[in-house]
Image: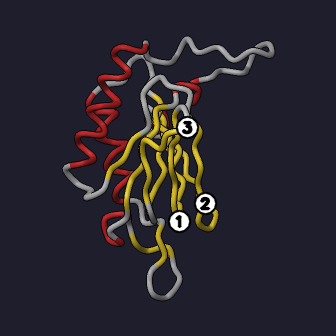
Amino acid sequence: MRAVLQRVRYAKVVVDGETVGEIGPGLLVLLGCGRDDGDEELRYILDKTVNLRIFTDDEGRMNDSLLDVGGELLVVSQFTLYGDTRKGRRPSFVNAMKPEPAEALYERFVEEARKRVETVETGVFGAMMDVELANDGPVTIVLDTADVGT
């Protein structure tokens, strides 16, 4: 599982001209599911997402987590995080999970996030989405379960 976390002042997702998800200060999470991902990978990414100390404290240091600051989450599915560009000019997505199981895993991620974070908004799985954000910092962190233990 891969996630790109962007600390934001605000973020929103628009589908067909309609805002479907919108948050204030918090994290925009672009979430991609790999073909072999499951609950273990989901828990790892979710734990890192809500507990990473990437928000500034009163002294301006990155010491606080999303949970510490009461931040919001906007979770957007993004299979293109599994685009392999090592060969040719067209990305290969063979390592991305198939849509049906990926949607189920994405929905479980959102469900588990809602148990920990008061405000969790989403995009629309599989839709063409416009994502608007004000990146705060900018702070952008990439998480990948393939890196666990390295």
Helix, strand or loop at mark 3: loop
Q: Give the residue at mark 1.
A: 9
In percent of width and height, residue 67 lies at: 31, 65
Q: Amino acid at mark 1?
A: Arg
Left-right relation of 115 to 97: left
Seen as rendered, the residue at the extreme front is 17
Q: Give the residue at mark 2.
A: 135
Mark before the other along the chain sequence, 3 or 2: 3
Seen as rendered, the residue at the extreme left is 115
Give the number of the disc on residue 17.
3
Q: CA distance from mark 2 to mark 1?
A: 6 Å
Are the residues flagged by discs 2 and 1 in contact, CB closer than 8 Å?
yes
Quadrant placement of the N terminus: top left
Q: Callout 3: few (<14), some (14-19), or many (20+) C-alpha neighbours within 10 Å?
A: few
Q: Nearer the viewer, residue 104 or 133?
A: 133
Name the residue rendered at 52%, 31% in the picture: 78
Helix, strand or loop at mark 2: strand
Mark before the other along the chain sequence, 2 or 1: 1
Seen as rendered, the residue at the extreme bottom is 59
Q: CA distance from mark 3 to mark 2?
A: 22 Å
